[in-house]
Amino acid sequence: MSFSSNYIYGLHAVQAVLEKEAETVSGLWLEHARRDARAQKLMLLAREAGIEIKKVKRQELDALVGEVRHQGVVAATSAVSARDEAWLKTFLSSLQDPPFLLVLDGVTDPHNLGACLRTADAAGVHALIAPRDNACGLTGTVRKVACGAAETVPFVQVTNLARTLRMLQKQGIWLTGADAEASQDIFATDLRGPLALVMGAEGSGLRRLTREHCDQLVRLPMHGSVQSLNVSVSTGICLYEVLRQRKKKAG
């Protein structure tokens, strides 16, 4: 059974959309038993925006979004629209700083995408790019896990990832792919300047065509018995190494 992606849920996600995009919210449902400070904050934001608030039983929230961890709060909203390649071109031309992009090559787990969005926001990524097919989009679960980052980090879905990668290269953006078989250690690689970090899907990693489009491949050193890391964990480490190098250059 599928549920509408126009419902978002979870305290962080709902508060973020009420603070940043209240005009997209048409209704707020709160579990009637919630009278804590977090719930009071949500109701205050909703009232200030003229949004209808409904106090309901938990079963009614379950009926709206399914048996997920909604934390007793659900909002009906016009879903955040994914941007496209045309938007991306215009956006890149407007940036004042060297572009810092994250490309996810077919990540399908909404928890991983949400975690990547959250870390991308923290690391200062300008936009996250993903293919439209065979990959996760901005679902309610993604937005909950992202804790507001889905409203701050532009999410770009493209129909042809290889074509988009070529466009980025023409814009002078260096494509750095993370690959377990790469010979180059990420911590010994220059990651300054215009850059797109390209991460592979859960389990399978980068697709062959995506790998071939990368300007360089890097790996995370693995010194234990574990052979690989979760894609959101790997992404976080790589993004912060880029951020570390950028801050060092700026200093």
Image (cartoon, helix red, strand yellow):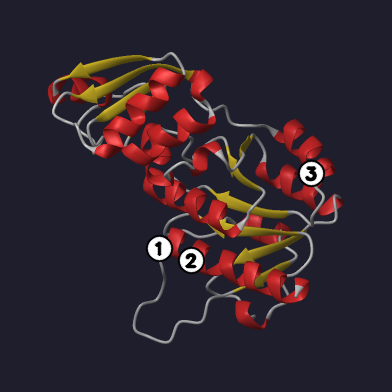
Q: Earlier in the sequence, mark 3 or mark 2?
A: 3
| Quadrant placement of the C terminus | bottom right
Residue 81 seen: yes
Q: Residue at x 48, y 35 (%)?
A: 137
In the image, 101: left or right of 37? right
Instruction: Tell me: residue 226, above or below residue 38.
Output: below
**Badge 1: how crowded within 10 Å, few (<14), some, or many (20+)?**
few
Q: Is residue 109 visible?
A: no
Near mark 2 (Cα within 10 A), the count class, few <14, some 14-19 or many ≥20, is some
The reply to whether the C-beta atoms of the residues labelled 2 and 1 are less than 8 Å apart is: yes
Identified at 50% across, 44% down, the residue is 149
Which amino acid lies under the numbered mark 3 shown in the image of this protein?
Answer: Leu
Q: Nearer the viewer, residue 207 or 14?
A: 14
Kind of residue sitting beneath label 2: Ser
Judging by the rendered image, the residue that carries numbered circle 3 is 92
Label 3: element kind: helix
| Residue of label 1 | 230
Q: Are marks 3 and 1 in contact (CB under 8 Å)?
A: no
